[in-house]
Amino acid sequence: MSLFQGLSFPGFLLPLALFFSCVFLCHGGTTSIFVRNVQKGTTMSLDSDVFSVPSGYNAPQQVHITQGDLVGKAVIVSWITEDEPGSNAVRYWSENSKQKKKIAKGELVTYRFFNYSSGFIHHTTLNNLEYNTKYYYEVGLGNTTRQFWFITPPEIGLDVPYTFGLIGDLGQSYDSNKTLSHYEMNPKNGQTVLFVGDLSYAENFPYDVNLRRDTWGRFVERSVAYQPWIWTVGNHEIDFAPEIGETEPFKPYSNRYYTPYKASQSTSPFWYSIKRASAHIIVLASYSAYGKYTPQNQWFEQELPKVNRTETPWLIVVMHAPWYNSYNYHYMEGETMRVMYEPWFVEYKVDVVFAGHVHAYERTGRVSNIAYNVVNGICTPVKRSISSGIHNHRRWRESWGVSNQHDRTTAGILGIQRV
Ligand SMILES: *[C@@H]1O[C@H](CO)[C@@H](O)[C@H](O)[C@H]1NC(C)=O
Ligand SMILES: *[C@@H]1O[C@H](CO)[C@@H](O)[C@H](O)[C@H]1NC(C)=O
Ligand SMILES: *[C@@H]1O[C@H](CO)[C@@H](O)[C@H](O)[C@H]1NC(C)=O
Ligand SMILES: *[C@@H]1O[C@H](CO)[C@@H](O)[C@H](O)[C@H]1NC(C)=O
Ligand SMILES: [Fe+2]
């Protein structure tokens, strides 16, 4: 995703470029004065302000939204009530219209995990929204009603700029709070978060493991109730715990976080695609089967030819485990998926891949390692140039200022626009 891959250097600049790339190779390059803490972050205590329960009988809490269809004209609103099921209706209206308020009805789920019974988890989809419009919405009708708002994306198209936030591995330490605050304060104003997996790290708290999913939901509400977070599943969402009889992977996650997977003909909430502004975004699942003949593999193969670069010139893929990572931790965990899917990424010219998992910020230029066939010795990733034609007119407008500020988290901003 380097800005410079598509540009040719004038001859006299070339030695300079080589010199810098040598410096980069030899020393890894220094792009920030920040040095990560060696210790893990300190967990925010249960009585922290960010975890406070909204007051009022049966008040909706952990309110979160995500895209609810393929093209950005629907929103899934989710929240939890603790005292009784309460209403699963959402009342909503657009800022400008004089039209009367609408009501959408949804569904209610609960789950048990070991000795924990979840609250009443509501998921309600608001359909047929207008593009580029501010909507207000209310949940908790009948008892304690809380009001929020969101802004729908512009209509999908070639020349539509948009700004995505990038957050992964968030957790619930004081550093997590700083990361979220940095994202919120970023002057580039992220409009939608691509969340690259690992949400609450709840299983790190053996005595209040389930409680910590609820605290995390309350912590991030201040952002995700107002702008969609596009969910990717990480290893901390697997929650496979046969020692306590919990053998259904992803149980808490899949009850709490819905995705619009059916709209892209996926058969699983863990892999799916959406279109938003000028981007076609494909979400892959690092911890669901992806080998040949598996449902994810079949879906992905059918999905790629559907990408219409005239409509959505940006092709973005998000996943949890990175394919390229020079860090010792989690080294090569993404390798088998890379072997399966990288030839398709090259063929279909994926613009950029975002992954989480490794709590250290790294980025590479546009590389691939598809020539390697185990015995041919071509085992060093090669640089790839951006193809000609329309793709040359695209440019990242990016700000990575919030990246790697803290020890457990990653966050950044990605702006896309035509130049
Ligand atoms: C979290 O960050 C917000 C916004 O910066 C701040 O108001 C709040 O006090 C912080 N809470 C904790 C526990 O750090
Ligand atoms: C669930 O089990 C844990 C560990 O045995 C215990 O500490 C906790 O109090 C239990 N919670 C409930 C709701 O029973
Ligand atoms: C909560 O709302 C329900 C449905 O409107 C109503 O029957 C009930 O009396 C309310 N409870 C309280 C405590 O307000
Ligand atoms: C791709 O999108 C453009 C612009 O919306 C449209 O005119 C064209 O028909 C689409 N192509 C296909 C194959 O759907
Ligand atoms: Fe992870």
Image (cartoon, rainbow, N blue to C red):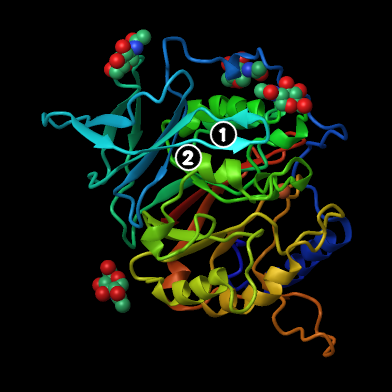
Horizontal arrangement in the rendering, residue 336 relative to residue 138 (left or right):
right
In this view, the residue in front, 293 or 36, is 293
Neighbourhood count class around disc 2 (C-alpha, 10 Å): few under 14, some 14–19, many 20 upward: many
* Residue at screen point 35% across, 43% down: 75
What mark, if any, has residue 190 been given in the picture? 2
* Residue at screen point 22% across, 31% down: 93
Is the residue under label 2 in contact with that under label 1 (CB below 8 Å)?
Answer: yes
Q: List the residue tagged with mark 1.
A: 183
Q: Is residue 347 visible?
A: yes
Extreme-top residue of the structure? 56
Residue type at the position of mark 1 = Tyr
Q: Earlier in the sequence, mark 1 or mark 2?
A: 1
Horizontal arrangement in the rendering, residue 302 relative to residue 9 (left or right):
left
Q: Of helix, strand and loop, which one carries label 2?
A: loop
Residue 65 figure quarter: top left
Disc 1 from disc 2: Cα separation: 8 Å
* Residue at screen point 48% across, 78% down: 388
Across and down, in percent, residue 402 comes to: 64, 37
Neighbourhood count class around disc 1 (C-alpha, 10 Å): few under 14, some 14–19, many 20 upward: many
Residue 58 figure quarter: top left
In this view, the residue in front, 71 or 91, is 91
Mark 1 Cβ inside 8 Å of ligand 1: no
Q: Ligand 1 quadrant?
A: top right
